Amino acid sequence: MTKVAKKTEKNEIAVFDYSSVEETGFENQTEEDRSTPYLGILQQNSPQCRDPEDGGIEGAKAGMFYNSATNQVYEGRNEGVIVVPAYTEHVYVEYRPRESGGGFVGTHPVSSDVVREARSRAVAFNRLSVNGNDLTEQFNVYAVLTDGEDALGGIVIPFTSTKIKAYKKWNTRVSTLLLPRSDGKRAVPPLFSHLVRVRSVPEENQHGKFFGISLSPAVDNDLESSLISPDDERFVVAHALMRSVSSGEVRAAAPASKESNSDAVIGEAPF
């Protein structure tokens, strides 16, 4: 009879050592075999906030964070979640308009001919289109979700519309931190040396109320206190994620949405 993981006396799951097995069963898989774990903010109109009998998630409320791959929700307004950012990218995501059925079409690098041409034809700031489809500016942060000193796995945090301001503010702050090195020079620490607290924050504009996002140093709101060492598991995992993304081995897949806005998978903010 095949053995399975059993609970120990301390009610913990026993972890088996599989190091003697060379094969994994994942050899023939690529990123196309998996869904991208997007971490987004639930809004009042998010389907996850419905009654569980209507397809919602038990305990899900507006302002919580939602992992689109695992269907897990996390408290967002107080402690939030702590991540280690690994890599960032600036893209434009192409969607069909709702009146045309909606749906994801493709992702274009900011330097692509498609984006350059759309920008040259834009009649309003950042209202871009191509072949009748909408182009939405998006900054993706690939990061490692943490639990205490443990690294839980990679996620993608998309920043669109009003969230972009929070992304740029944080990115400016960490990219201007200079620390002394062993050679006497000063340099900016790696992006994946930072512990970052991600929270949801209530916001309001002329269209209504919604939840935005904030990024801050995880320890005492101080950048230097929130740095982790190169031998920290969270640093090691984030560094590996950075290499995988930068090499093209890992890339965010299409959002699991039929709508025209990338936030629609978790409910739309009134932008």
Image (cartoon, helix red, strand yellow):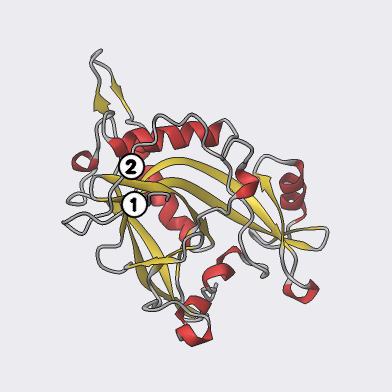
* Residue pointed to by mark 2: 16
- Residue furthest to the top in view is 183
The relative height of residue 36 versus residue 204 in the rendered view (above or below) is: above
Q: Find disc 1 in the rendering and name its residue.
A: 5
Above or below 209: residue 40? above
- Front one among 1 and 22: 1
Q: Which comes before the other along the chain, label 2 or label 1?
A: 1
| C-beta proximity under 8 Å, tags 2 and 1 | yes
- The crowding category of the residue bearing disc 1, from other C-alpha atoms within 10 Å (few below 14, some 14 to 19, many at least 20), is few
In the figure, 173 relative to 180: above or below? below
Does 91 appear above or below 190? Answer: below
Q: Alpha-carbon neighbours of circle 2 within 10 Å: few (<14), some, or many (≥20)?
A: few
| Quarter the C terminus occupies | bottom right
Task: Name the side, left or right, on which 209 lies relative to 194.
Answer: right
The image position of residue 153, as x and y in percent, is 40, 47
- The amino acid type, in three-letter code, at marker 1 is Ala
Which label belongs to residue 28? Answer: none
Hey, what amino acid is under mark 2? Answer: Phe
